[in-house]
Image (tube, rainbow, N blue to C red):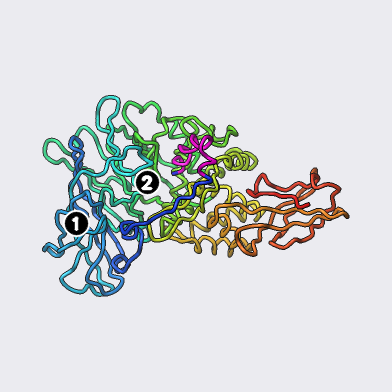
Amino acid sequence: MRYALLFLLFFIASDGAKAQLTKAKEIFSKADSLRGTLTPFRTCYDIKYYHLDIKVDINNRFISGSNLFKFESVNDFKRLQFDLFENLSVDRVEYQGKELPFERSYHAVFIDFPHIIPKGAIDSFKVYYSGAPIAATRAPWDGGFDWKTDRHGKPWVATTCRSLGASVWWPNKDHQSDEVDSMLISVAVPNEVMNVSNGRLVKTEKLGRHYTKYHWKVHNPINNYNVALNIGDYAHVTETYQGERGPLSIDYYILKENKNKIKHLQKNAKETLEAFEHWFGPYPFYEDGYKLIETAHLGMEHQSAIAYGNKFQNGYLGEDSSDTGWGLKWDFIVVHESGHEWFGNNITAKDMANMWIHESFTTYSEALFIDYHYGKEASQAYVNGNRKGILNDKPLQGPYGVNKEGSGDMYLKGGVLHNMLRTIIDNDEAWRSILRGLNSKFYHQTVDYNDILNYLNDKSDFDFTKVFEQYVQHKSVPVLEILQRDNGKVFCRWVADVSDFKMPIHIGKKGQSKTRYEINATFQALPIKVDNIDELDIDTFNYYIGVMECR
């Protein structure tokens, strides 16, 4: 979800300097820790299966129902934590036909079993709940239910909860480190509309005269914030894409009033899948299919059920953040949110602090889409053009254990970082192999900072440890200091926050090809002689760095 940053860029010009000078002290509460920390009450069980079964009372903006937790015990325990926002009522918790006692602390709920659950046991409990969920006022930038109507006055409702957390509307183990293996989502809605959720529709059930329940089966692991409801008066169009793993179903759910605009989505969806299967490997969720669902909000990377609200136009609501023109040749929401199927949904960060993994690779996926269809030069121009939106306000990596992301620079600066890695490796087939390998090695897995770094180091034969430390864990960029001696010889070194920083860079003389040199924090001579520093050609187009001449 990159557009949250794009939305903010409109305000940067007038207030950017002030933002750079103001350093706010972040204070985290007990509620933050309960939500973001893996305590023994959460690590004691591994969630295996959910059955979320709810009714949505649209007129009263009220939900009610249950969620079945099926889990495996990681160690002996008697108490565990699940999560549900405190404005929603836990009506009861059932275990083996009896009610369990529970306690609430902010958005955390603790239950006590009548006996020790032994290590390795497969067990379950069911949470019944109800209430008026938080209404999103600026979906998808904030979380909750987006209660809207279409032009004909029919309900048009969706959920978004990436940063806020899935427990804003349904009870679950709300931490990204533990993805449920599979899930059944059963949602009852008024007969005049339908509900579309993740996975495949396996059953439709009439409930009396006024409601219909839609049962959606998710066959693959899914992180909690991706679970979604999309309620509307939808037209359904389906087709088959011949992908790397064979036939892949593509389903489009768009408002009936917009059915004549379906060709725009069909073109962009096929072009996106073709480009990303080339760069990243097979679409990760063939069993659950690929869906685009029209929403009143702009969009979200809901696994196998991508929310789409870009009004059937190219660019980001008709704009190109790079100002190169390349961003106007494709639908931003289709491409970006589909990129998350590989980075974010297939490969998922264990902690919100590492959401830069999701957003940096996915922002870079936009450039790779351009590369596939329009060439490498266009791709790199797009990445370079996006630099103007980088703030360098704080690190891409957020604080651990408090459900907190890092800087919004995780999008644009993150995309620049990956383009730099490609430039350093200087072998596009090797780079493609690394990207595909990431999605194969960590297929349907959760990862952390070191998982990504170690894989890149191992497969590239470069040590990117210092590079990642500087660009991900610090806010500023390294500066290349250039020194020219009287004899024309050129010396250079890196100045950075990271001690003993080192990073290769391509340098040459203007009008000649550039060579990759290994540069560290100590002045070293280059095999280049110039009469004037201005004769040097440093690749600042693909390397996001500062350059300073020493005199």
The answer to whether one can see residue 244 in this image is: no
Of residues 396 and 62, the one drawn nearer to the viewer in this rendering: 396
Residue 317: image x %, image y %? 46, 31
Looking at the image, tell me whether mark 2 or mark 1 is earlier in sequence order: 1
Viewer-closest of 397 and 304: 397
Percent position (x, y) of residue 125? 19, 62
Residue beneath the point at 28% across and 45% down: 201
| Residue nearer the viewer, 436 or 296 | 296
Other-residue count near label 2 (Cα within 10 Å), few / some / many at <14 / 14–19 / ≥20: many
Image side of residue 198 versus residue 9, left or right? left
Amino acid on which the number 1 mark rests in the picture: Val
Give, as a single range, the part of the protein colored magenta: 2-19
The tally of labels here is 2
Q: Nearer the viewer, residue 393 or 192?
A: 393
As drawn, 445 above or below 21: below
Whether tag 2 and tag 1 are in contact, CB under 8 A, the answer is: no
Amino acid type at mark 2: His
Image quadrant in which the N terminus is located: top left
Q: Nearer the viewer, mark 2 or mark 1?
A: 1
The image quarter containing residue 487 is bottom right
Q: Residue 389's image quarter? A: top right
Judge whether residue 165 can be spotted in this image.
yes
Coordinates of residue 253 in the picture (x, y in percent): 34, 36
Whether residue 300 sits left or right of residue 531 in the image: it is left
Label placed on residue 127: 1
> Which numbered circle lies on residue 302?
2
